[in-house]
Amino acid sequence: MPTALVTGASAGIGAEFAHQLAERGADLVLVARSQDALDTLAAELRETYGVVVEVLTADLVVEDDVKRVAARISAPGHPIDLLVNNAGFGLPLHFADNDIEDEVRHLRIHVEAPMRLMHAALGTMRGRGGRIINVASVAGFISRSTYSACKQWLIGFSRWANAEYAPDGVSVTALCPGFTHTTFHERMGLKQGHEGIPAIGWLQARDVVREGLSAASRGQAVCVPSLRYKLVVAVTKVLPSSLIARAARRGRV
């Protein structure tokens, strides 16, 4: 059976990836900071789907933890067939007011950790085949402080890597959802539905993940789930940047 490694797997989009992959028969390696949450999810997946589930507790802003996850990805004899880089957190948009160490950790988890894990995955997937899904954001198409900048990097790098390593049988997909019902916003102290975003602007994690997996299976470099957010991305290409920046101050994507 194929084996998938999912970071940020304890909740939200990561947990949904774990469920949908297990439903398809994939064995799993679940990575997150919370041992209890991972153990609970792993037990549920084993019982429901009968798959093999490993738990790897790691904080991906810590270099040694990233190295442990990278070592599991490239472990001889038990390779990873699908890597889902999903772990992350958000910060307030006011960069100058944020603690710089928080910003550094933010950069590490959104850019450095995915880069290191992709490097490990490519080392074992090239010639054998495999898929990488990088969970980015619609925010990567607009200017919204460092979160947007990190996601822009992830989208751009995924585009390049998808073309570069396709001849080696590896696809790389940047999954770019908009506002999605998860615990992401709650961890920032924000209440979903109270960010000036109408109900129609919110996506369901199950739909986001389903579209992401479908796009990866087709070798698609960038996936923007839902027509409404495809339209948002299209509009960002024609509106003045100053107008987009003002609109982008609302909410967290």
Image (cartoon, grey):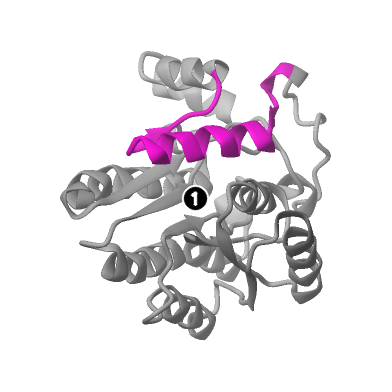
Q: Position of residue 116 (x, y in %)?
A: 38, 70
The quarter of the picture where the C terminus appears is: top right
The residue located at (41%, 68%) in the rendering is 117
The residue located at (47%, 78%) in the rendering is 72
Measured along the vertical axis of the image, is residue 12 above or below residue 50? above
Q: Position of residue 204 (x, y in %)?
A: 70, 32
Q: Is residue 22 left or right of residue 213?
A: right
Query: Does any portion of residue 45 appear in the rendered image?
Result: yes
Find out whether residue 225 is within the magenta segment: yes
Span highlighted in magenta in the image:
200-226
Q: Position of residue 176 (x, y in %)?
A: 49, 36
Mark 1, residue position: 146
Find out whether residue 142 is within the magenta segment: no
User: Badge 1 local density, few (<14 within 10 Å), some, or many (20+)?
Assistant: many
The residue located at (65%, 49%) in the rendering is 92
Query: Does any portion of residue 152 appear in the rendered image?
Result: no
- Give SS at disc 1: helix
Count of numbered circles in the view: 1
Inspect the image, locate mark 1, and give the three-letter code of the amino acid beneath it: Thr
* Relative depth, front residue between 129 and 196: 129
The residue located at (74%, 43%) in the rendering is 182
Q: Position of residue 244 (x, y in %)?
A: 49, 23
* Relative depth, front residue between 190 and 36: 36
Residue lying at the far bottom in this picture: please name it. Answer: 64
Measured along the vertical axis of the image, is residue 77 above or below residue 249? below
